Image (cartoon, rainbow, N blue to C red):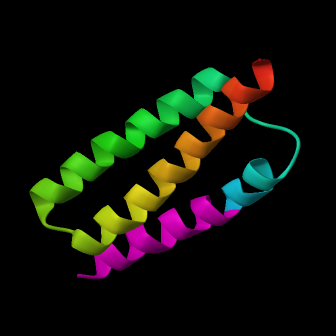
């Protein structure tokens, strides 16, 4: 399915764009990271329903990236 490959490409671009935040000093606002993580979970559930297994994997990776940013932001506040 071509649409699944486009979803994977878009997720890949987003994942790569998160690397500077993950490895850098500046982190996004905590609320933004939490909401983005929740959106990823919603997308994962939708992709499960649609049977887009590669898109599920790509979204799990993106959700993990957002979750890393959530924990980094929480840790930096303490």
Which quarter of the figure has residue 28?
top right
> Which quadrant is the N terminus positioned in?
bottom left
Expressed as whole percent of the image width and height from the top left, the position of residue 47 reads 22, 57
Residue 62 visible (yes or no): yes
- What is the magenta segment's predominant secondary structure? helix
* Residue stretch in magenta: 1-16
Q: Is residue 61 above or below residue 37?
A: below
Q: Is residue 4 above or below residue 70?
A: below
Most extreme residue toward the right is: 25
Give coordinates of residue 45: x percent, y percent.
21, 47
In the rendered picture of this protein, how many numbered marks are placed on residues?
Answer: 0
Question: Residue 23 at x, y = what percent?
Answer: 79, 54
* Residue at x 49%, y 51% (from the top left corner): 64
Give the percent coordinates (x, y) of residue 21. Answer: 77, 48
Please give the name of the residue rendered at 60% of the width and 67% of the height, measured from the top-left corner: 13
Q: Which of these two is toward me, 71 or 53? A: 71
Can residue 29 be seen here? The reply is no
């Amino acid at each position: 399915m071509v649409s699944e490959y486009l979803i994977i490409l878009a997720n890949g671009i987003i994942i790569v764009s998160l690397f500077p935040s993950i490895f850098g000093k500046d982190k996004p606002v905590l609320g933004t990271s939490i909401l983005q993580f929740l959106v990823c979970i919603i997308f994962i559930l939708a992709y499960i329903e649609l049977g887009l297994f590669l898109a599920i994997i790509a979204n799990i990776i993106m959700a993990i990236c957002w979750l890393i940013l959530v924990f980094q932001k929480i840790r930096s506040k303490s």
